[in-house]
Image: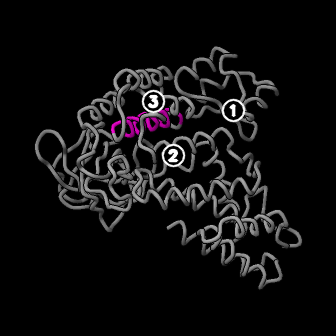
Amino acid sequence: MKTTLNLLLFCLAGTFASCGASSENTPVTPQEMATSGQQSGVPQSAPPQIYIYVTEVDKLNLREQPSKSAKVIAQLAAGDLVEGTGEISSNKEEATLRGIPYYEPYIKVAATTGAAASGWAYGGALKPVYAGPINIRPDLERVRALSKFLSTLDTKQLENGSKAIGYVSSNFSSASGSLADAAFLLLEHFLFRMETEGNLYDVLGATAWSEQDISDIYEDRFNMNKYPVTKKMAGNGFRLATGEGMVFPVTDWVKLAEIFETRVTPPMKEYIMENMAERRESGFEDGGITIGLDKLAERAIFWENFNDRNPYFVRAAETAENERWLTLVLLNGSDNTPAYDFETKAANDDFKNNWNLIIQKYPGSALATNVKALMDVYAANGWKRTPKVEEFLSKFSQTEGE
């Protein structure tokens, strides 16, 4: 059980550090299809009146019932916009889209152009760009124009990063509120697709990195103009990251913040700025924790508070996972920074001190409640990593991840 849980944390650490728990490869879930509605004074806890999604694949089937065996009513093109009221099927099905496996429910939606077709579309093929009050939804024609433009760009061509950024800069320079939010979501997702589906690794593959380069990349002080290939990367919306001796490209959230931070809604600005900060100092390297445990606790509390304030944020599933995963790391440690000694099974003093600090500094928080529950189990077992502690952590991981 210990090995399985630690391996899970190790894998999640690598994903979160390079992609942001977010990751975009994670299938879209119903909880991700919501937004705050803050810009019009609508209560943040009010359920969204309307959901708007962009179709992720071409010839997406719209069916009479939520099943791949049901009759096809119509087909949707990549980049189309559909809308719904949040109705989700109780069943889930497996599907592979663009080489990525999904296990998702269906979503009841209606086309926003052409014939008034409505039915069930596979959730893994839909990307939410808005969910909230009808009266402040973004201009659908402008969102559609951007999504259609991005759907024509090949994610394997590096120069398409600058084309996407240029289109947004030219056509959304005055956009604000929900329209700016939608533009950010579409652009960030396209760059992430380039990062994960393209051939950016191959572009960097021939570069001979010096030890100083690796150090500068890790410390986020590498000069992207140093080599022609890195200068080109920067011009197309990417920076460099390093891990396990490898150098790889990641979306440049600093550039995204420069474009959007003054024009998006307040919750989206918070989301962007925190993601930018966490990507500039990931806190994880080769399965180990590289920042103070107190700082990890600050991040977990940030996401807990953010989720409490913005229960219908458009990327709520991602931000909830950020909170859940950071909490799990604070309770369990990571592969190379465990919360206990492998030989003696004794709880690690640094973690114990941090657990006490969390209880003192964040009373009443969910994080403090979970830490206190773990400490009670540890204390009842002589502060040793016993099967009872393992069982607690395993149940916590399964429950919180549901």
Q: Say which label, 3 or 1, has the lower sequence index.
A: 3
Residue 49 placement (x, y as % from top left): 25, 56
- Asked whether 202 or 141 is in front, the reply is 141
Asked if 2 appears above or below 155 in the picture, the reply is: below
User: Which residue bears the numbered disc 2?
Assistant: 271
* Label total for image: 3
User: Which residue bears the numbered disc 3?
Assistant: 155
- The amino acid marked with disc number 1 is Val
SS under mark 3: loop
Residue 313 placement (x, y as % from top left): 42, 53
- Residue range in magenta is 179-195
Q: Quadrant of the N terminus?
A: bottom right
> Residue 247's mark?
1
- The amino acid marked with disc number 3 is Thr
Which secondary structure type mostly characterizes the magenta part of the structure?
A: helix
Asked if 99 appears above or below 399 in the picture, the reply is: above
> Does 336 sit left or right of 296 as displayed?
right
- Asked whether 78 or 167 is in front, the reply is 167
Residue shown at 47%/29% (left/top)?
Answer: 259
SS under mark 1: strand
Residue 193 placement (x, y as % from top left): 47, 36
The span from disc 2 to disc 1 (Cα, nearest Å) is 26 Å
- Asked whether 131 or 290 is in front, the reply is 131
